Each structure stands twice: as structure tokens, then as C-alpha cells.
Image: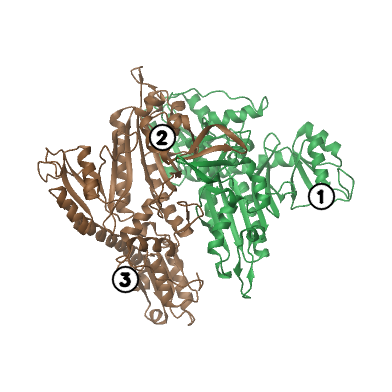
Chain colours: A brown, B green
Amino acid sequence: MADKKQVEQITDMEVDFAKWYTDVCTKAELIDYSSIKGMFIYRPYGYAIWENIQRLMDAEFKKTGHENVYLPMLIPESLLQKEKDHVEGFAPECAWVTHGGSEKLEERYCIRPTSETLFCEHYKNIIHSHRDLPKLYNQWCSVLRWEKTSRPFLRHREFLWQEGHTMHATEAEAREETQRMLGVYADFMENVLAMPVVRGRKTEKEKFNGAEETYTVECMMHDRKALQAGTSHYFGDGFARAFDITFTGKDNQLHYPHQTSWGVSTRMIGGIIMTHGDNNGLVLPPCIAPIQAVVIPVAQHKPGVLDHAATLLARLQAAGIRARMDDSEQSMGWKAAEYEMKGVPLRVEIGPKDIEKDQCVIARRDSGEKVFVPLGQLEDKVRELLDAVHDGLYARAKRNLEENTYACASLEEVKEKMAQRGGFAKTMWCGDLECELRMKEEAGVSSRCIPFEQEHLGDTCAICGKPAKHMIYWGVAY
Amino acid sequence: MADKKQVEQITDMEVDFAKWYTDVCTKAELIDYSSIKGMFIYRPYGYAIWENIQRLMDAEFKKTGHENVYLPMLIPESLLQKEKDHVEGFAPECAWVTHGGSEKLEERYCIRPTSETLFCEHYKNIIHSHRDLPKLYNQWCSVLRWEKTSRPFLRHREFLWQEGHTMHATEAEAREETQRMLGVYADFMENVLAMPVVRGRKTEKEKFNGAEETYTVECMMHDRKALQAGTSHYFGDGFARAFDITFTGKDNQLHYPHQTSWGVSTRMIGGIIMTHGDNNGLVLPPCIAPIQAVVIPVAQHKPGVLDHAATLLARLQAAGIRARMDDSEQSMGWKAAEYEMKGVPLRVEIGPKDIEKDQCVIARRDSGEKVFVPLGQLEDKVRELLDAVHDGLYARAKRNLEENTYACASLEEVKEKMAQRGGFAKTMWCGDLECELRMKEEAGVSSRCIPFEQEHLGDTCAICGKPAKHMIYWGVAY
């Protein structure tokens, strides 16, 4: 760190939320731009957040019986075309490789926008009997989608993600897997990222290209826009038929297996920023913060201060807490601002007066609250405060979600309230695409999901007045 | 597992080493072929080996102060061309992206064959002062090189690797980093992969495109061919000048920083196979084996056997050993062959007679030796045996290396001995490219390295008879 830079001011989120967001992304040193539009550099601090997410989520995948694999990044055009709905959705945003070395390729290859087709090709080779099922595979990789617009973490041409791809002997098993993984995502968002979610099913219009059903976890950002944080898809046997993947069942007959896929990406980091951040910068949930506590010696030139600070650091690290010390020559004010910008959950300060009193001072990033902690209780108290920060962040985000989710009885009401306050409007819906399109056109909102937890708000569709089938959430999404 | 397949015979390595190798890769389920030539699928068992390598090596990188980042996979052609030697070396084997969606790109992009140019572009943005140095970055990713021939793990068009890229204020620091990371690699190969190495410097001809110096760790495979297992490069300030990266020094003057890069790849897995494998299949060094010990109940239908086996499994897992149980209906012979093929270091068997005697039987994969172990000593004995397997593998490989490294006084002698026995021929060398090319043409060998540990074998070059500058190793390489 040292004095290499001044901690700079960022735009207030109330003034310009979009500018505030990109300020945080760059000033907290999460990301940098490259010379290709829409392709970003994940800097060490941003990548360290992803590494923590990966480590914790990968453990959940393994607990639920999944194995990691790595498949090629290129897809021959003919392979991509095997499943009609799938190629229609993805072909327009593929980057195409046409030359290898100095030679023009006989067939062009796209860089994977997602890997269903590659997994199917492989599954055809390795699935023959019911004993080969289920196949529960996951892949950590980057994918490419040639989007027109871009924004750090939220929309990259290349982004990091994981994609689970599984094959099952029965529809019931595959459907159960689709739900199980949505549950893994929902629990992760809430318990690890402190982001409350709404769980539900996507409409026909919004589901994944080629899927029979898409399930989603939807979060509400601080500006009351929606972020689709993770999705889980049930494919039926559509791809299996297209790729001619069959297995011999216990009945000695040939069957098509049933398929799922599910994914989350570095988009979640955008969600963390927009859910928890404030006008001083990033605020990180403790479970994934690269630095959970930073130790700052006060009046460090005074005798004994650095030694005491070093002891605190060593104790925290020994207790398994991700801790750092900043004993650089920067001022206390600079350091406080720097670690606020970086969203470090706890700042542990110790100076000559604290040493006399056998204590340190711990400041919480979320609330700004400062507590005096007897040195004998350091580890326990830090653990307790990290939990408290998580709970505080979750509670605040939950309040935001609940206070800004409201029932509407008509398209007009959605339009009016959405313009005033954003958030999620819930209405009854007949299930027709026409009404969904009208809502988009007239109120500027997309359907977020048909929540699993249904409420009976009335008997008729808020848009057309025909009998209602579902309660649905609408919102403006990232 | 179950009875889904028969454990198949593989080709004897003495009959056809290349066929033996690909048999092991596919029959041990490490790899599968995709529909694109030279692009392979890392299957769960192969990828799990890579995950173990990554985890252990990443910890070493972090201990030595490095941070992980992720940079884009595409390089604009103009960026690649900034350093002349570099582009000359890589352009002929680049895969080129020419279209994004339906639009032709204004400039074509190559998929990274290596990322020096991307790192330099980023470094130019973030290095301004001596306080910004050193930058110690590493990236785990896949790279693409459009090679004509391919072979599992050894030569892929796309392969997984890590690439370290660092920038330093002084030449001395950068040179020290180059050596430090070669040391990290050498220790890793020997202590983790049980592969003894020769450390040295590459000749001008063999060094990395754009580097001032390339250092290497060279291993000898079971067939006595060489494998370059890892390299570390010192670039001087060549790229910094080409990319106009400067920093203000303590002297308030502008300077160019000094650069290094270093990498290892999934090629190491090919090295593991060819160093330790035998005619029964894979033999894995315990540190990176996905399964370190497999528990196999004997006569498992007899009362109490499965319970006892499950207890053994639980105890091993609780002791931090990567253990599995196979209580499938397969025969004991099938199971023994299966776990031999998969290279699992230890097979722990327990049956009714063992239970009576309060013992189990542990079979070592490397030597076939079986030992009776009192159940009370299970964890300690398994740890001891895992160490013994590692040491046994290392000793055998070291013997192979030493017995097949020999001094030669003339090109003729190299030619003759190399044809007879392969291995590493060491000779004195004048340092001239001509002699290196003659050696290649007439004896079919390439220079492996100029070892750090020099020996004085004579005063004159074995090829031309002029005064010698170095002792050098020659060999046939993968």
C-alpha cells in the first residue's frame, strides 16, 4: 500500500448509482479495463473474492456428489447446431475462430458461450448403461458472449463461472437435482454472501435456450433493481435425443437420460457490491472477504506498539481469521478510508493507551460502531463480530427486499409504482406471453420469476383480466 | 464402479511405450478425446490430479508473495506484435477469432498462447512508481497453441497451466525471482511428484521467445526420454521498452522495470504417468493421488465385515487421508486390478479372519508388498506407508536418471549410445549454435540444458573440438 495513492472520493450512490458502482469497482481495485471492449481484468483483490466463492461453493458441489471436469473451450459449429433452440439463442453472440495458425479452418469453431453441447458429445461416449448414471459433473471456466454493452462483473464478453451438467436415469431424479442445486445456490447467497433471495421459476419467455424449465434465485440491489444471481435448468431428454445419447435400463431397453445444468458467475460479485456497498465504498460479507480484519497500529513509532500489533495479527491468523497488518507510514485517516473503500469487515486498532488498558478497539465496516475488546477475548470477539457483520448485512438487505416488494392489481399500478420506487411488483398473471410483453412495453419491467411461495392476490390477471394462473414478480433487472 | 466394465488389458510398455501411454490415459479414465483434433477432455480422475497439483502449488506461490489474477483470453493482433521475437515465435500457432456474433471484427484477436503481452498492457496501467513494485502475479487458465500433432497431456491444442508474470525495480531482483520460482518448481517435482529433476539453463536456441534467459527443470521418463517439466524466464526490460512501461525510481528518474515469467502445465501429469507407471497401469505419487487409500471389504456378505470396513474408512478420512471404500459386488480380483490401473497408492483389505486377529492387510501399489497392520496402528501406519511409497517412487526414478546419464567425448559416441540406450548424454560444448544443430541432425538429440551443477569432462567441444564453454545435457525430448 504505502503512500502510493490518495484514497479518492467516489460518486455518491444517491447522485449516480451507475457511476458509484464503477467507481467502487475500480477504486477498490477489483477490476481494470483491457483494450478489448467488454473484456475485463480481474485484479488480485477482485480475484481473491472469486477464489473464496469458488472454494466454498466447490465444497458444496462435492458434498452433493459432483465431480469437476474440464472440456475444450471451442465448439465446432455443427455441434452447436444440433439442438435447435439452443443454437438460436447463442449463435448471435458467439465469437468465431476461423483460422488456426496460417490455415483457414474447414469448419469454424465458436468459443464456448456455455457447454451443453460439449458435455452431450462427451456423455454420448461414456454413458451406455444405467450403471453409468447419474453423471454429476461441474466445470469451472470462462465463457464468451459477444455482447454489445458491458459493465464490470455484470456483463462481460468473457466472464468466469461454473457450469454444472448432469445426466440422470429418470425425470424425477433430474428434476430433484435441478431443485437441489437451486437450493445450494439460495443457501450460498444467503448464508455466505448475506444476500436474501426470492426463489422461483422463470416464465417460458425468460427460460434458458433449450430448457424445459429454468429456476432462478433473484436478489434486490440497493437501487431496488433486480439481479438474477443463479439459475438451474431442467432439460428433459431434448439434448439426449438431439445427440442420440441412450442407455440400457434395468429393463434391458434403451432409454434417453434426463439432463440438468446450473450456473453462477462472477456476476455475484457485482451483486455483493450493489447489495452491501455504501458511499465509502465496498462492504464485504465476512465469509468471502479476502481480508476479514486489518490490524492497524496507532502511534506506531511509540515503544511496544508494533510488537503488540504483530502479536494481535499472529493470534488472529492462528485462529484461522484472514488478517493483515498495515504498519505503513500512511496517516490513520488514510488507512481508515482505504480499508473502508476495500470493504474490510473489521478494523482492529491498538495504540499506547490501549496497551495500558490491555485492550484493542475494533471498528465494524457495516455500522461504523467501535467496541473496546479486552485482549484476552480477541479471537472470540472477532469471530462474534464477523458473525454480527454478516447478520447486520443480511438484515439490512432483507429489509430492502421486503420494503420494496409490493402487490399491484393492474398494469397501471405497476407502471406508476415502479416509476416511483422500483423494486419488485407482484401481480396475478394469466400465464400468456402477450401480457408479459405488454408489461415490458408499457411498464418497462421484465418478469423476474413465478415464486415458489405463491400468494393469492386475486383471481384475475392484472394485465388482461382473464383468470389468473400464478402470482408473479416484475422488476427492472441488471 | 460396479460391474459396468471389465478391467481391460493394456499394452506392455516394453512392447510399445507410446501405446502403453495412451492406454493408461484412457483406461485409467484420465482423459477422453473430443471431436476437435488435439483438444482433450480432462475427466474427473485426471482433473482431480490437477486440482491437487493446483492446490499445493498455489500455496507455494502465495507463500512466496504472489497474487492470482485473471486476464482476458483474447489478444488483439496489434498487441501481440509489440515484441518482435515474441510474436515471431507464437503467431504461427495462434487460433484467430475474426467474427463476433454476425459481424466481422475490425482487428482479429488470437486466443492467448501465453499472456506476456496482456500482462504488459495491464502493467502499463498500474505501474508508475517504485512503490508499485514488485508486482508478483500469477494466473491459472488454459491456453491455446494450434499444434499439428497431439498427445494426451503432453501436447494439446488447449491445455491447462499457470503462468506467473512479475515486474521488479532492478535486474538483480528479477533474476532472483527467476531462480526462486525455478526452485519452487524443482522442489515441487521432487517432493510432491516424486520426480527427480536436472536444473539448468536453456541454450539460446531453446529459450522462450523474447526471453533473455530461460531456466528449466528436466525429468527423465521411464523410456529414458526427456520431459521439460517447468520453465522460468528472465526478460530483462525488453517487453517494458516495447510496451513503454516506466516507473519513477527513488532517484526521481524514469526507469524500465525488469520482468520474469514462469509456467508449468498439465504436461506434468504426462510426466507422472511416464515416470512412475507400470504394466498394470498408473502409479500415483501419494501427495497428488485423488484416492490415497481404497478400503476393500473381503467376503463382505459375512457378518460384521462391512461395518468394520466402514469404520476403517471413517478413521482414515478423519485422519485427513483421501480414502474411499469399494463395497460393490465386483470380485476381489477385479477390484485389485481396477485400483492398480488407477494407481491408488494403498489398498486396505479387511475380511473375517483379519477381524478375528484385529488387523487389516495393506498392499502397496508401487512394490506390490503386503503388510499386516494392527487396527490400533491404522492411521500411523497408513501415513508411514504413503511416505514409503513416495520415497520408493522417487528412489526408482532417481536410479533411472542416474543410470542413464553418461558422459560422451564425441558426437559419434553420443549417436551410438543414444541409439542403444537413450537417456541423457553429457558432453562439453563450445556454445555455438552450429554444433547444437549438428547434434540434432546427426544424433537426433536436442540440448536439454546447461546444468547448474557443472562438471569438467574435458577442455574441448565434443562436436567441433574448439575450446569448451559448458558441460551440456543432450536427449530426445517429449
**Residue type, label 1:** Gly
Q: Quadrant of residue A195?
A: bottom left
Residue on which disc 2 sits: A116
Q: Which mark is residue B431?
A: 1
Asked whether, in this view, residue A173 is left or right of residue B197, the answer is left
Number of residues whose C-alpha sits closer than 10 Å to that of mark 2, classed few (under 14), some (14–19) or many (20 or more): many
- Chain under numbered label 3: A
Residue A292 versus residue B442 in the image, above or below: below
Q: Which mark is residue A177?
A: none
Q: Position of residue B108 (x, y in %)?
A: 55, 45
Q: Are marks 1 and 3 on the same chain?
A: no
Q: Nearer the viewer, residue A336 or A209?
A: A209
Number of residues whose C-alpha sits closer than 10 Å to that of mark 3, classed few (under 14), some (14–19) or many (20 or more): few
Secondary structure found at label 2:
helix
Q: Are marks 2 and 3 in contact (CB under 8 Å)?
A: no
Residue B227 versus residue A248 in the image, above or below: below
**Residue type, label 3:** Gly
Which quadrant does the N terminus of chain B fall into? top left
Q: Position of residue B170 (x, y in %)?
A: 65, 66
Q: Nearer the viewer, residue B286 or B133?
A: B133
Determine the CA span between mark 1 and mark 3: 66 Å
- Chain under numbered label 2: A
Q: Position of residue A20 (x, y in %)?
A: 36, 63
> Along the polypeptide, which appears first: circle 2 or circle 3?
2
Is residue A258 at all visible to an observer of this figure? yes
Q: Which mark is residue A368?
A: 3
